[in-house]
Amino acid sequence: MMEDRYFSPDPAQRQVARTLYETVQSLPLICPHGHVEPRLLADPNYQFGSPVDLLIIPDHYIFRMLYSQGISLEALGIPRQDGAAVESDHRAIWQSVCDHWYLFRATPTGIWVRDELSDVFGIDLKMNTANAQAIYDAIEEKLAQPEFRPRAMFERFNIEVLATTDAATDTLQYHQVIKESGWGGRVVPTFRPDAVVNIDTLNWGNHIEKLSTVSGIDVTDYASYIQALEQRRAFFKTMGATATDHAATSAYTAVLTDVEAETIFQRALAGKATAEDAKRFTGHMLIEMARMSSEDGLVMQLHVGAYRDHNQRIMDGFGQNMGADIPMTAEFTRSLKPLLDRYGNHPDMTVVLFNLDETNYSRELAPLAGHYPILKLGPPWWFFDSLLGMHRYFDGVIETAGLYNTAGFNDDTRAYPSIPARHDVWRRASADWLADKVVRQIIDEEDAAAMIAAMAYKLAKSTYKL
Amino acid sequence: MMEDRYFSPDPAQRQVARTLYETVQSLPLICPHGHVEPRLLADPNYQFGSPVDLLIIPDHYIFRMLYSQGISLEALGIPRQDGAAVESDHRAIWQSVCDHWYLFRATPTGIWVRDELSDVFGIDLKMNTANAQAIYDAIEEKLAQPEFRPRAMFERFNIEVLATTDAATDTLQYHQVIKESGWGGRVVPTFRPDAVVNIDTLNWGNHIEKLSTVSGIDVTDYASYIQALEQRRAFFKTMGATATDHAATSAYTAVLTDVEAETIFQRALAGKATAEDAKRFTGHMLIEMARMSSEDGLVMQLHVGAYRDHNQRIMDGFGQNMGADIPMTAEFTRSLKPLLDRYGNHPDMTVVLFNLDETNYSRELAPLAGHYPILKLGPPWWFFDSLLGMHRYFDGVIETAGLYNTAGFNDDTRAYPSIPARHDVWRRASADWLADKVVRQIIDEEDAAAMIAAMAYKLAKSTYKL
Amino acid sequence: MMEDRYFSPDPAQRQVARTLYETVQSLPLICPHGHVEPRLLADPNYQFGSPVDLLIIPDHYIFRMLYSQGISLEALGIPRQDGAAVESDHRAIWQSVCDHWYLFRATPTGIWVRDELSDVFGIDLKMNTANAQAIYDAIEEKLAQPEFRPRAMFERFNIEVLATTDAATDTLQYHQVIKESGWGGRVVPTFRPDAVVNIDTLNWGNHIEKLSTVSGIDVTDYASYIQALEQRRAFFKTMGATATDHAATSAYTAVLTDVEAETIFQRALAGKATAEDAKRFTGHMLIEMARMSSEDGLVMQLHVGAYRDHNQRIMDGFGQNMGADIPMTAEFTRSLKPLLDRYGNHPDMTVVLFNLDETNYSRELAPLAGHYPILKLGPPWWFFDSLLGMHRYFDGVIETAGLYNTAGFNDDTRAYPSIPARHDVWRRASADWLADKVVRQIIDEEDAAAMIAAMAYKLAKSTYKL
């Protein structure tokens, strides 16, 4: 009954969408960017805990919405920074979540969880007050089975490759364990140096100390800092990394002289850097990271435009990344020019752009990617990883950038069992969008078939060199 | 024939839309924000005057469009500030309006007037040159009947509650008359203190004098000013108010120290406040108004982003609010943070946000409302109170904020007899949007039925505590 | 089979769209703004060269996309500034273009070229590797025939009038030749003074010298400069011009005093103008150009928001306008106010606005055009001259501005044989958009018929006084 879900109701379009979808439905999953913890896959016997441990506590998409309607994070079992008691009765938490599940009507979370329950756990009950405990029971029962351990899921999900996101200072010990375990799943790290690059990071000095330790290079000045970063990138490459990832408030880039870079770096070490220093240093380091990518071939991802940890009370009580990040306008045309002046025409280099300001799709991102050889556009990010978000992205990007300057899909998730649902939504949305182009005779079926294969599988694989 | 108007032509979607619509078509109207003059309802025998008095002269949506095509406001009978003669032949004005009615093809005004003529006045003639006088005759005939007095319309429209918008200095005399009249219609005031809060208001000093008079508190400094505002809020509450309303150029908020507030207030009293003073004072007073709402429970509405009275010649000739207000970009993520830092997590407080920059729907407003407990999103405002505007609003908001962080509909109109048409457009647009979600199997029919009831009736009632 | 292309698949909507489209399909083409070179039409025996000369080398829409995927401009035969050798084997270039034509799937260029091959050249082969040489042969064969000379095409295309875009310093010699040739085609110039108005233009001094020469007025100061510009406008009018065109980075306008204008002008003559000078001078000159339009009746076009020649390496290697222009945000509400304060209410004057920031459609442009008598909105420009771009434009503009404050279509192209395809896309997109309004009963068929005639033909003709 649900086999045509998310497709247009128009019979002609639906028929084409279904046909296109069927050609990619079973393709392996390429997961070039996400936040699954590698320790899940390092331990062959890893178990997920309760349904609440699995689905609620780690998922800020879910608890932010419940919080917005007056349910405290404590009541949802989210641990406090100060260690004060929070609700520990997971059946009660689950009941409350189901009681309020109506809040997720017509949201991406609503359909991911429904699809995940159905397709991963074989549960076709609706999340609501009446079904709460039965669903809890059913998930609990499944999680006790060996088939629901992470490695078994990895295989059943048909994941061809999964990239994690790892701090520059990470020893990649879990990746090492996976590698040495003889297990066949391909899990690769991604080099994310934000905590050492953004000098306004909380406890930045500690991260620099850690960088010295893991790199074996005593980071005392800008030159040794750059050297240590290069050492880490080389190490990540030996561990299978094909990409780096960078988060910044804005896409601002500008080259500093060595003297300026050194001066700001020393101010930061002394704990005296200003907000302006931080902005300029990040803007410089993005170009420096592009320089390194031009040399070592790691694909550079840039995520800009989030105001992180906007709610001070939540930040104080529960820490970072607790569902209180809010998007801002972003600008690329002027901001990226210094980086593009240096590396924009590089013949063998890739920068993948992500942002949270959809107005850039058609205005700045598609025109930039439709000209500069190094630029590719990442899929709709975060709040826009949704049916309508994808539709707006395709509409805004493809006419001007062309499909082949986009980077396919990534699920960007830490919610491991939701991975197939997320890819499935993308594949269905892609099929539906292309079907509209077919029935309007903008493209023919041959083109559409090639495009859906690119969207569902090939573009992610080729963009990220996987 | 028109019973399916505004619905998708797809037969499956249309069928679902119609079914959903029929469940809410006859629900009472909740009107939590608008500009109907209470004197219409204070006088049981109030009569509307001519069709031009009723439909053209008070409606800047209509005369702005005619003006844009070269028809002078004088020719439309709009009174001049200097009292110079304007066209007084209402039949001639009406003829000219009908001659130019083609300008309103595919506009919201075009469908409101058509629906209003048909559903309120029983006139199914098209507005055009040939029909002009016949329509005029028919409206005139109706207006002479007791059934077309405001109170009779109120009952026939099935209005459950109507909120007006009233200056902080208003004595609410008409509300008093209504209350004491024994008539059953529920009409409540809304506290709108812009003229005393925005110190760059024309003749601000006069408004402050009036504030002293009506409050009985001699407003000579910032402390007495705050005291007078609190007195007025308390008075409005006794008169049935459940909400306040605030208009500002931007959503900028920032706390002033008492000394700063006093200093700016004294400069304003002395007529020496600067533009920067005005911005800072409004930004401070928005937080102060939030503080009062956190104490007295009045729902706080914030409307930002209009460049008021943009056309100096029109302003000089005809005064304020004459169809020359133009939207501007708006910013919320950074602007509202100071207010949210103080009150964003309040357990029992509501701030409803409106703006004229649709890019904020998905970028800033939905993420904010999908996190902060106090925030709700008002319906599409002003230029966006239209079929496509609603569609973009639903698309931009619901996936991220969820439906239940929105505030339902308000008609925001001074065009009293257009109220049912406006609610009907919203209900139809809601049904059509939900029907698309049903036929794509994003939600099921049970969810859709609950959602349409919320959109058409419940959310406005609960958000505004009506 | 392709007769319903670009229409909705819904049978009811498609039927209405087809019926509407058929009423305008064969109407003459009004081309009020574009970049066709008049010399094509001055020489009755002009021949286009090879298919690559005709379709690839002059079309930056095409080579920018190929460049973005790593194909050098040299490999496409684009001449270098330094005269270094580039690929000269046009068959090899054509083969490479066809090999990569998949990049244009679902892009406007993809459908223009397909429609042009089919409708102008009678070639129904798909652009791909296998068909490359056959298509080359077929085009080459056609181009050798007299029916494919520009004047013959002009007549077959049913062009009623074609406006070119010409520098203020242009002698309009080709227009003179066309005029004197006795040929019946109407080709009119457009006055575009950017190179003399924007003082940061490359070699601005040379343009001023040229202005002195062609005007016969020795331009030595601001007064003689204005006088020379007025002389040129008058000359363009005698040559049939009905419009001017102005490109600016932003819509910023502000009046300078005569002393300020003179001071900046002298600094510019001395080669010492700053970036701020350039901005202020352009902002002033836009108002001055509006003043001249208020006197001589030339329709003023304003195109804002492109960051021109963003890629320094391409600019250095190949010059300006080589597919590296990138849009930026634009602002109108505050920026245009100084101009509108002076001329916004003028009873007989027209300013047509274009921009590359689609967020302005509903936020600023439609409200401005729906109020100010002088303002009309140009069709979606450049990157947005596409099926989805048109859809967004109609959606964003018509509800608030009304159709009759828009300026119809212009093809804005230098790709001469693509003109019919571009108008056809617009006519089909218009029909499809209106059909949706009919089937939703927002407008009736009578209204739709009048609107499609306006969109396809009448509005362009009346707005530009053609």
Image (cartoon, coloured by chain):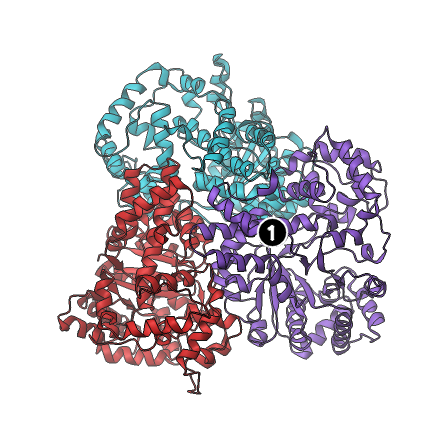
Chain colours: A purple, B cyan, C red
Chain ID at mark 1:
A
Q: Position of residue A280 (x, y in %)?
A: 65, 68
In percent of width and height, residue B207 lies at 48, 36
Q: Please tell me in which quadrant of the rendered image residue C196 appears.
A: bottom left
Could you say which is closer to the camera, residue A225 or residue B427? B427
The image quadrant where one finds the C terminus of chain B is: top right
Q: Is residue C268 above or below residue A103?
A: below
Please name the amino acid that badge 1 sits on.
Answer: Trp
Picture coordinates of residue C131 (x, y %)? 42, 69
Closer to us: C163 or C169: C163
Foreground residue, A222 or C127?
C127
Check disc 1 and report the residue beneath it.
A426
| In the rendered image, the vertical position of residue C250 relative to residue C57, given as above or below | above
Q: In the rendering, at what x and y percent does residue B320 appear?
A: 39, 40
Question: Residue A354 sits in which quadrant?
Answer: bottom right
Q: How many marks?
A: 1
Q: Residue furthest top?
A: B182
- Which image quarter is the N terminus of chain B in? top left
Neighbours of disc 1 within 10 Å: few (<14), some (14-19), many (20+): many
Q: Nearer the viewer, residue C163 or B181?
A: C163
**Residue C107 horizontal side relative to residue A75, left or right:** left
Relative side of B168 to C436, left or right: right
Tag 1 secondary structure: helix
Decide if residue B251 is in sight here. no
- Residue A184 seen by the camera: yes
